[in-house]
Amino acid sequence: MPFTTRLASFADPDDAAAVHEVRRVVFIEEQKVPESLEIDGLDAECVHALAFDEAGEPIGTARLMPHGRIGRVAVLASWRKRGVGAAMMRILLEEADRRGFEEIELHAQTWTIGFYETLGFKVAGEEFLEAEIPHRRMVRRRGISRD
Ligand SMILES: CC(C)(COP(=O)(O)OP(=O)(O)OC[C@H]1O[C@@H](n2cnc3c(N)ncnc32)[C@H](O)[C@@H]1OP(=O)(O)O)[C@@H](O)C(=O)NCCC(=O)NCCS
């Protein structure tokens, strides 16, 4: 099934609502992350990616923070493993290149390391807990694609 992706901003209330809706389903409902951790007040400073189905309903989101960290990467369960996550990551990585970051980092839930490796990220550091979920720090040098 086809989908589209684009950059988004919290300056647009419809985009902000779409981001929150996907993250509520994936992080708060599915992964049981407390709402107080999910909504951290940093979204207005970030550039976001959104993915939509053919009907225009949001199916995925991710964000790039001003200091070069990507996070809050989420795809609705029914849309996973169809390239939605990778497509959103690619437009955020292009944006990161435009902004001149030499290195992009993220905190990957350990079970998703393989996903980020397909996009050129490498594990950098030991496992740690965030929202009680095991994570590893990963980094990607500018312009690097998958090995
Ligand atoms: C992680 C997540 C964003 C991946 O999104 P997705 O749309 O399913 O990923 P894609 O279909 O674009 O996958 C891209 C590549 O990564 C691989 N991949 C996807 N999920 C993977 C996983 N959990 N482990 C290993 N590889 C994975 C795919 O097989 C694909 O490989 P290919 O290019 O060789 O075909 C999605 O599973 C998700 O939203 N999970 C719940 C929220 C979450 O945990 N987010 C991460 C927070 S760090």
Image (cartoon, grey):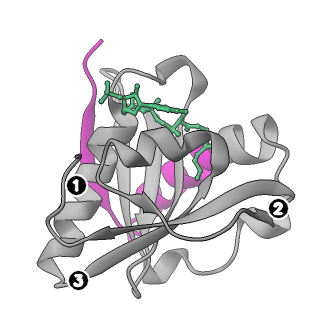
Image: 125 above or below 81: below
Q: Amino acid at mark 2?
A: Ala
User: Which of the 4 image quadrants contains residue 128?
Assistant: bottom right
Residue beneath disc 3: 102
Q: Position of residue 41 (x, y in %)?
A: 65, 80
Q: Amino acid at mark 3?
A: Glu
Q: Which region is colored magenta? A: 1-23
Q: Between 46 and 133, which is closer to the camera in this rendering?
A: 133
Q: Residues within 10 Å of mark 3 (few under 14, many from 20)?
A: few
Circle 1 sits in a helix, a strand or a loop, which is it? helix
Q: Between 82 and 26, which is closer to the camera in this rendering?
A: 82
Circle 2 sits in a helix, a strand or a loop, which is it? loop
Mark closer to the chain start, 3 or 1 = 1
Q: Between 66 and 136, which is closer to the camera in this rendering?
A: 136
Residue beneath disc 1: 91
Q: Quadrant of the N terminus?
A: top left
In magenta stretch: residue 7 = yes
Residue beneath disc 2: 131
Q: Residue at horizontal 19%, vertical 52%?
A: 145
